Structure formats: structure tokens, C-alpha cells
Amino acid sequence: MPAHDPADRNRAEQTADWIGWHLAELLAVGVPVVLAATVAVWLLSLSVLAGALWTAAEIRAARRPELETPPAGRRALPSRPTPAAQSGTEADDRPERYGDPS
């Protein structure tokens, strides 16, 4: 199977990847908690370790500058919504459809 460029991935692939990673992270924290409650309390330390690693990975990912720019071919979302342009009627805005109002 050929290697894919991350910019070529579609939204479904990105969503599946996100769900897979987060499911693995939740299991890495959750399974030791359940085992600590049912088998041995010392397994709680594994959950704490997994949580600490997860937190460090999320902080590192949030600080990466390359994630601030959108992939090629995709526009960045504005940081704030842009206000609607003040205009007249639709006829004023679209003279090619309704004719020149002057």
C-alpha cells in the first residue's frame, strides 16, 4: 500500500484516526482503573502514568506550530466571525440578475 500524504486524507479518515487514538488513550487510562478497583490497588499507578503521558502528549501537540496552518487546499477558519456586510436589497447587490438600478 502506498504511503499517503497527510494533506490528502479526507475527513472520514481524519475522524477515524482521531477516534482510534482517543479510544486507545481512554483505554490506557480506564483499564488500569477498573483493574485497580477489582484486582489490585497498585494498578492505579499504571493509570496515573498513562494519564500523565497522555497529558504530556496533548500539551506537546497543542504547542506544535505546524498544526496552526491548514493543510494544502483547505482554508483556515477565521479566528472571529466576520460581521455581515451592510448592503441594500438583493437587487442592489446583484445588478447582473435584476438590471442596473440607476
Image (spheres, rainbow, N blue to C red):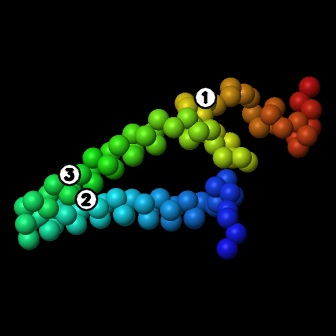
The quadrant of the image that shows the N terminus is bottom right
Q: Nearer the viewer, residue 79 or 62?
A: 62
The quadrant of the image that shows the C terminus is top right
Q: Taking 101 as reference, is 60 above or below it?
A: below
Residue 73 in the image, given as x and y percentages of width and height: 73, 48
Q: Could you tell me if the residues under marks 2 and 1 are in contact, i.e. CB atoms within 8 Å? A: no
Q: Is 8 positioned to the left or the right of 93 in the image?
A: left
Q: Identify the residue under disc 2.
A: 29
Crowd rating for badge 2 (residues with CA inside 10 Å; few <14, some 14–19, many 20+): some
Q: Is 13 positioned to the left or the right of 88 in the image?
A: left
- The numbered disc on residue 17 is none
Task: Name the residue rendered at 15%, 67% in the picture.
Answer: 34
Q: Identify the residue under disc 3.
A: 48
Task: Name the residue rendered at 63%, 43% in the picture.
Answer: 70
Give the foreground label among 2 and 1.
2
Residue 7 in the image, given as x and y percentages of width and height: 67, 53
Kind of residue at badge 1: Pro
The residues bearing labels 2 and 1 have C-alpha atoms spaced at a distance of: 43 Å
Mark 2 and mark 1 lie on one chain; the one further toward the N terminus is 2
The residues bearing labels 3 and 2 have C-alpha atoms spaced at a distance of: 7 Å
Mark 3 and mark 1 lie on one chain; the one further toward the N terminus is 3
Task: Name the residue rendered at 91%, 40% in the picture.
Answer: 96
Kind of residue at badge 2: Val
Q: In this figure, what is the number of numbered marks?
A: 3
Q: Identify the residue under disc 1.
A: 83
Q: Is 77 positioned to the left or the right of 49 in the image?
A: right
Q: Secondary structure at mark 2?
A: helix
Residue 60 in the image, given as x and y percentages of width and height: 43, 40
